[in-house]
């Protein structure tokens, strides 16, 4: 894919007319997308830090973060899938003399 860089009229044309390909990209539009992605990445990092803090607080109160993470994953899943998986696990454990 070939691209042509198009500068916005209010910015100096450092690459104006430079052929990068046959499609055209508005540099200011691309910059807006990149800026949005960077802001969202920052927010994602902040949220991840907050989640870690909540797990640390729960741990300090005597809860097991590893089990809490499992519960969070389970709550996202379809209950029928969970039931089917638990049934198969139980069958396998029975077959191995573990249940």
Image: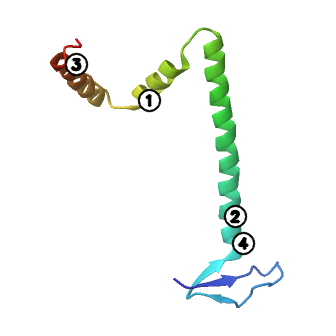
Which residue, given by chain and number where applicable, does mark 4 sit on? 28
Left or right of 5: which side holds 21? left
Q: Is disc 4 placed on a helix, strand or loop?
A: helix
Quarter-of-image position of residue 97: top left
Report the mark closest to the observer, 3 or 1.
3
User: For mark 4, does the 10 Å Cα neighbourhood hold few (<14), some (14 to 19), or many (20 or more) residues?
Assistant: some
Mark 3 touching mark 1, by CB under 8 A? no
Q: Earlier in the sequence, mark 3 or mark 2?
A: 2
Earlier-in-chain disc, 4 versus 1 = 4
Q: Residue at x 45, y 22 (%)?
A: 71
Asked if residue 44 is positioned above or below residue 58 in the image, the reply reads below
Residues under numbered marks 4 and 2 in contact, where contact means CB atoms less than 8 Å apart = yes
Alpha-carbon distance for marks 3 and 2?
Answer: 55 Å
Marker disc for residue 73: 1
Query: Mark 3 or mark 2: which is in front?
Result: 3
Kindly report the distance in space between the C-alpha atoms of the residues bearing marks 4 and 2: 6 Å
Instruction: Point out the residue furthest to the front here.
Output: 96
The residue that disc 3 covers is 93
Examine the image and state in which quarter residue 79 appears.
top left
Query: Which residue shows up at 67% across the image and 30% down it?
Result: 50
Q: Nearer the viewer, residue 20 or 79?
A: 20
> Mark 2 near mark 1, Cβ–Cβ under 8 Å?
no
Vertical relation: 4 (above or below) 94: below
Q: Which residue is at a point 69% across and 83% down the rendered structure image?
A: 6
Please identify the residue farthest to the top as the structure is shown: 62
Q: Secondary structure at mark 3?
A: helix
Residue 43 placement (x, y as % from top left): 68, 43
* Within-10-Å neighbours for mark 1: few <14, some 14–19, many 20+: few
Q: For mark 2, what is the residue?
A: 32
Determine the CA span between mark 3 and mark 1.
Answer: 22 Å
Front: mark 3 or 4: 3
Name the residue rendered at 74%, 81% in the picture.
7
């Amino acid at each position: 894919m070939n691209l042509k860089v198009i500068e916005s009229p209010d910015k100096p044309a450092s690459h104006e007319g430079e052929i990068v390909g046959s499609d055209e990209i508005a540099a200011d539009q691309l910059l807006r997308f990149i800026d949005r992605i960077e802001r969202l990445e920052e927010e994602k990092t902040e949220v991840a830090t907050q989640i870690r803090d909540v797990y640390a607080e729960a741990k300090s109160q005597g809860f097991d973060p590893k089990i809490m993470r499992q519960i969070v994953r389970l709550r996202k899943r379809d209950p029928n899938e969970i039931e089917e998986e638990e049934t198969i696990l139980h069958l396998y454990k029975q077959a191995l003399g573990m249940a």
